[in-house]
Image (cartoon, rainbow, N blue to C red):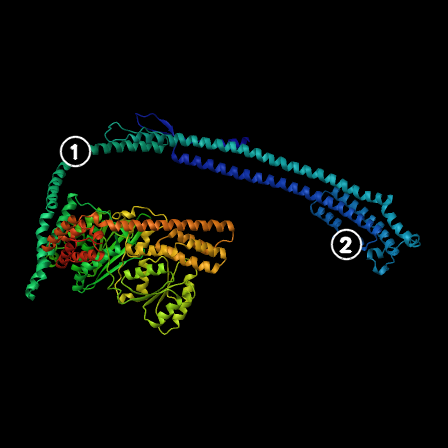
Amino acid sequence: MPSDELDFCAFFDIEEHLYWQGDAMKSKRMIKQSTLSAIILAIFFFIAVMLIWSILYMNSCIRAEQNAERRRTEFKQLGIDLADASDYLTDEARKFAVTRKIVHLERYWEEINVTRTRDKVISRLQELDSPKEELELLAKAKKYSDALVETERRSMRLVLEALGVDESDMVPEVASFKLSEGDQRLSREDKLLKAIEIMYDARYDSDKKNIMDPIAKFQRIMNQRLESELEAARRGTAGATVLQIILAFVIILAIAVLIRILFTQVTYPIRDYILKLKDFSFDDEEFRLVPKGTVELNMLAENFNELYRSFHNELVRRKKAEETMKAARDEADKANRAKSEFLASMSHEIRTPINSIIGYQYLLKNSVLSPKQREYVENIGLAAKNLLAIINQILDFSKIEAGRMVLEEVDFNIDDVLNELMIIVGMEAKRKGIELRIKVDEDVPRFLKGDITRLKQVVMNLVSNGIKFTHEGYISIRVELVEKNEENACIKFSVTDTGIGISDEQKKLLFQAFTQGDASTSRKYGGTGLGLAICKRLVELMKGEINVESEVGKGSTFSFSLRLKIASCNENRNGKSKSVDTEEQYKNVKILLVEDSSVNLQMTKEILENMGIDTDTAQSGEEAVKKAESNEYELILMDIRMPGMDGYEATRRIRKLERGSMPIVALTADAVEGVAQKAKEAGMNGYLTKPLEPEKLLEVIRSMTNGGGKFKEEKSKSCAKAAEAENPYYEHKYETLDFDGAVNRLGGKRDKYIGILKSFVELHKDDGVKIRELAASGKRDELRRFLHSLKGSAANIGALRLKDLLARLEESCIPQNCEKNAKWMNDLEKEFERLIEEIMQYIRAFDSYKGSSPENHENNNVREDLEMLCKLLLTGDSEAKSFFEEKLAYLGNVLRPEDYHDLKKKISCYEFQKALAIVDKLKQDFSGKLTK
């Protein structure tokens, strides 16, 4: 391919440039980046064109070969069809002469007049532009074939006349044939013999041969021609293949040349630059890059060398100035740290007298005072608390500046945090007539991990500022989810007020320490100007950022975002148990609980009564209808599957009653599609799946009973993992029993849970055998109801593995396959055995711990702690709250729950006199036997 090689070489006619490097540099040949790009583009274009051309040429050769092969096959088949058609006519004519069956006569003339294979073959060959010689051979064969038809017509006429067929009933072609006088004078038998004779005599065979010889010659000539065409096509394909191989080598060579140019002009120079720059240092005065590669890379190296010399000189000058400034800064930091460390270390000494003032003010306030004296006492308390807040701000700021502010990381519930803030600042907002709004978006994780104290401090400071600078309108606290993954979430907190607003000039000074908007702000509203500065520092310590948007006269919005870990437990596990007393909130709510399983009934009733809800029970649909007819209920919780009258039918009958308009919520262990729709069609208002979660149940009760007017939303949660660190019987890991979730649903009442477990063992210990008997008896409906009831009981006590196994069995209601049946029954019995064994272990461990737990704290130690608490309460020292939370958390496991929560509530509300009375009673109790 000489012309192609010349074209290819033309791409490498590279423009040469002379680059003058100065007197110290020799002139050398270099290539520009633009020239290199043009070469790459030309090679790419060349390769693309050659590839497209070679592909098109190869495809053309392949199609030519395929066409030749197809023509050969078609021509061959046409020759065969022509010979077969001639043979077919001969066979049918002879069969008719011998057998005298009309069907052969009909087939013969059908081929002649209808199928016409011979005519179609000749027509197709003419369409395919067959050579003239081949068409003449076929015409000759056709002529002899037509002559042979005359002989066959004679034979057919003889047979038909011998058979006595009337001429009008003959095939027209046969009827039109006239026999000779000699043939007509033949007898019937002679005519039949004559008909067979003329079909098998030498003359007929000679005529037949005259037909087949031209056909055979046609096939031979045709095959030779088509083989020549096919061979030519194959030679073209082989040539295209060789051309492809040559082109591949040319392309590889072109790419190799291109790679060589790229490596020598670009890749290697850049690599040398990088290796040199790895040892880069401004301390090396002799450092420089050696220019190489393309013109642009040479210019890059020269410019870098020039910049390096400039930076190096500038760096020397800056280092000298930096050393001077560093010495001055170290002196200033040393003085600032000394000040901050002094203030931080004085924390206890400054707070103690102020706490005493607040304590005595509290005692004095609870004594008999005149109205004027009570006003004075209130003012003393207000002034003392304000002073304490100011000092706390100064100490916090000093701790932050001294680097002594350490953040803790504990689990907390964001709803609890906001509820506490509502309690603390709500009274002040109410006093000023300001509405306090709280909104937490639904997608915000409720249980998080972080420094709850500092988070509350920031939000409270922002809310307090809003209340201080707002005279009418509202304060809004908004919590939003920014982003979330499996481990943590970015939460945005916003506090919006309708206060006096902040100007753009004031915003610049807003977060500076000891600075407020202007001097008049401090005189009119008070404060140190530290609050927002502390908020900013705390948010930054928690890896967040605080922002403000404001308009004078319309209000302000402070917002900050924090990335917090998502807690793995629905309870604050910092040792400070949080319990909410809800009896008062739900005292007006009466609910009917309908459940056929005694274990489920007991469990759900405990959950409801733990919320303080008056709960009536029924164990069948019939009993539920009777109680609904004779009692007033705010809500009915209805199990769906029950023997006899199920939940659907019971709901329909209740709706027909005069008092049947109360909300009805379905309870079921069926977590499948369609149940909610069926419940709705039956007249139910909602749908809950087992095991019941207190939060969801509480939400349903609130919505169904219009609870906003009857009680406030409160959430009572418990986390079994919080008790794990305190209770030895949690050390054993149970495989079949999820007691954490079950205790959660009972509000943390483990003793109630133990009672339910004991009932489960008593009622269901033989259920494995009963299921096997029901399966063997073939009572599928009864078996399905029994499995469903047992599945709900298992879910409620936390036997989740047993629940899943029962769900699979219920779905198929025992497979009919005997081997599967036996295997599933064996698995069920083994699971029952393991579950009963672990329940008994759990009960024994609980009983053992309950009997021994008071011994974990000696009476003398408890009395000493209570004595210290008495002293703090007696003096009104606010340290009593911190002492109780930090030192006496263990009392939650020693005292009766009601005593412990009552004491904690009184101390948290600074009702020290009432708390003192409780502690005195507890000290007397500890002279006898401790009870939990």
Query: In terms of depth relative to the viewer, which is nearer, 352 or 405?
Result: 352
* Residue drawn at point x = 58 percent, y = 35 percent: 240
Query: In terms of depth relative to the viewer, which is nearer, 548 or 445?
Result: 445
**Quarter of the image holding residue 761?**
bottom left
Q: Is residue 90 above or below residue 655?
A: above
Q: Do the residues bearing badges 2 and 1 touch, measured as CB atoms within 8 Å?
A: no
Query: In terms of depth relative to the viewer, which is nearer, 525 or 686?
Result: 686
One can see residue 552 in this view: no
Q: Which mark is residue 164?
A: none
Q: Where does label 2 land, which residue?
A: 110
Name the image quarter holding the N terminus.
top right
- Judge the density around disc 1: few (<14), some (14-19), many (≥20) Cα neighbours within 10 Å: few
Total label count? 2
- Judge the density around disc 2: few (<14), some (14-19), many (≥20) Cα neighbours within 10 Å: few
Q: Is residue 685 above or below residue 787?
A: below
Q: Where does label 1 land, which residue?
A: 320
Q: Under tag 2, what secondary structure?
A: helix
One can see residue 255 in this view: yes
Q: Is residue 906 left or right of 225 when viewed as pictured?
A: left
Q: Amino acid at mark 2?
A: Glu
> Which label's residue is closer to the chain start, 2 or 1?
2
Q: Amino acid at mark 1?
A: Lys
**Disc 2 from disc 1: Cα separation:** 118 Å
What percent of the width, then of the height, locates residue 928? Answer: 17, 53
What percent of the width, then of the height, locates residue 256? Answer: 46, 31
**Quarter of the image holding residue 704?**
bottom left
Q: Is residue 336 left or right of 74 when viewed as pictured?
A: left
